[in-house]
Amino acid sequence: MSIEDIQNEIIDEFSMFEDWEERYQYMIDLGKDLPLIDDQYKTDSNIIKGCQSKVWVHAEMEDDKIVFTADSDAIITKGIIAILIRTFSNQHPKDIINAETDFIDKIGLKEHLSPTRANGLVSMVKQLKMYAIAYQTQLN
Amino acid sequence: MRNVQDIRKDFPILSRKVNGKPLVYFDNAATSQTPQQVIDAIVDYYSNYNANIHRGVHTLSQEATDLYEQARLKIQQHFNAKFSHEIIFTSGTTHGINLVANGFSALLKKGDDIVVSALEHHSNIVPWQMLCERTGANLKVIPMNAHGELLLDAYADLLSKHTKLVFVNHISNALGTINPIKHIIEKAHEVGAAVLIDGAQSSPHIKPDVQDLDVDFYVVSAHKMCGPTGVGMLYGKEAWLKKLPPYQGGGEMIAEVTFEKTTYADLPHKFEAGTPNIAGGIAFGTAIDYMNTIGFQNIAKYEHDLLEYATEKLLQIKGLKIYGTAKHKTSVISFNLDGIHPYDVGTILDKLGIAVRTGHHCAQPIMDFYNIPGTVRASFAFYNTKSEIDALVEGVKKAKMMLS
């Protein structure tokens, strides 16, 4: 599925929720469900430090697609990571480079991707794109 | 004290909603809210007096200067400084600390000691580290116990004839501990060291008497005591302020300038380079008037009741741990829920309209001491109520239910 299709699917899922509590509970459950990253990759070099919560990101190339794994010490941050990974992982580098993240606004989680939130997520998105640019350069 | 519901009417922001819920503002240790009287003082200044001060011969400039200097007198009286020129307007506590640190860089030499406490805010650590790097002085740290109280015996052991400066906050921002600064100052003076006290967290709750404390420097921020942001005060004993070199060059701080030599202005202007935050300084004076009208004894008693009430209610929640359990503490509760990240708790509380601080509160060494990433911090002011604390308790219970 393309990144856009996945994002639309997520927007559909979130449109079923009636209030913030249901949205957040869903995100928290997503966060809980996912052992997102292999412990060996939870290293200092993979860490993105936010003032509020930490995020770890690891990238690998499989065939010509990037597989991302990630984790956080805060569960709501982790829930959002799960959503980001679902859209960006297993995609071609050039599609990742061109992908938008405004679907996060549409599912009512905009404040979590605010640069002033200091939870590491904005830097995480940048990092995902950086990996994509790096792998794309290798492919060229 | 005036009835709290009546006091709340002075603060327009307290009637707004956040995320559809009535705002419960418990981030007072970061910044206090602003009463209409202070807002009016700012509006009045820009509406009627706006002019540059200390240099114009015209009426507006004279009136603005008078208002600004009246504010300095109010601050002097409030903190009981001996002279009004011992009150230096700053942009806030951090500015005051840097001003003193910079001044001492000219006075320190290799082998001198600077003593700071383990309870410090980053802004009270970084300038001293920089100063030590510059001068070759050593930074020594007064340790604390698990309650968040400084170990005074260890402090006494750190002092020697090499100690030149001691820096301690009056009240810890992360834990609320009230430090025994009178004792700390006495001990430092016995070895001839100067003492700077960070009063950012104490000035909203108690009225310090700088002469009685015999403190050498005391710094505060207006925005924590119902005043505007971007303005604060450095109190320094006259003798010390004369000894320290100026911090910044510019207008206002000079007496005479030729290309060969500049002579500096007298106190306090020597440390007030450039056009200051005039409206802020005037409104700072209004804020001090406002708080004195409420009464600091009333404030302390009322906030202590809130602290006891909140502590008791919060501790009824299973798995909730409070950090900072000093015998003498102010109305700050730093806590965590077992196995839950403070960021998550803060996010859920925000959705309920409750403003708390989460994170390491710019006091990472304290968080390292407890081996935690941070805490949720609720800090109460005299305009908060027990029913708001009930809302916090319900909010924490909800967060716990959703997150565990």
Image: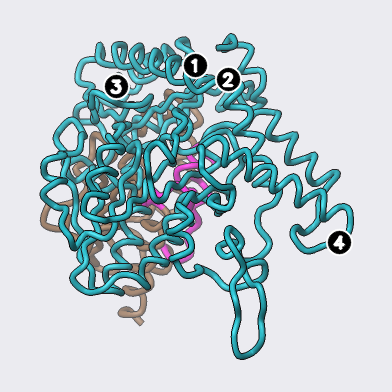
Amino acid type of the residue that numbered disc 1 sits on in the rendered structure = Asn
Asked whether A98 falls inside the magenta stretch, the response is yes
- Disc 2, SS: helix
> Do discs 1 and 2 share a chain?
yes
Q: Position of residue B351 (x, y in %)?
A: 47, 27
Which chain does tag 1 point to?
B
The residue that label 2 is drawn on is B294
Is residue B393 visible in the rendered structure shown here?
A: yes
Residue displayed at 46% across by 27% down:
B26
> Do discs 3 and 1 share a chain?
yes
The residue that label 1 is drawn on is B298
The residue that label 4 is drawn on is B57
Q: Colour of chain B?
A: cyan
Is mark 4 in CB contact (under 8 Å) with mark 3?
no
Labelled disc at residue A43? none
Q: Which chain is brown?
A: A
Label 2 to label 3: alpha-carbon separation: 37 Å
Say which label, 4 or 1, has the lower sequence index: 4
Amino acid type of the residue that numbered disc 3 sits on in the rendered structure = Lys
The answer to whether B69 appears left or right of A3 in the picture is right
- Disc 1, SS: helix
Q: Give neighbour class at mark 4: few <14, some 14-19, many 20+ (Cα, 10 Å).
A: few
The residue that label 3 is drawn on is B400
Amino acid type of the residue that numbered disc 4 sits on in the rendered structure = Val
- Disc 4, SS: loop
Label 4 to label 3: alpha-carbon separation: 64 Å
Which chain does tag 2 point to?
B
Q: Give neighbour class at mark 2: few <14, some 14-19, many 20+ (Cα, 10 Å).
A: some
Is mark 3 in CB contact (under 8 Å) with mark 1?
no
Q: Give neighbour class at mark 1: few <14, some 14-19, many 20+ (Cα, 10 Å).
A: some
Is mark 1 in CB contact (under 8 Å) with mark 2?
yes
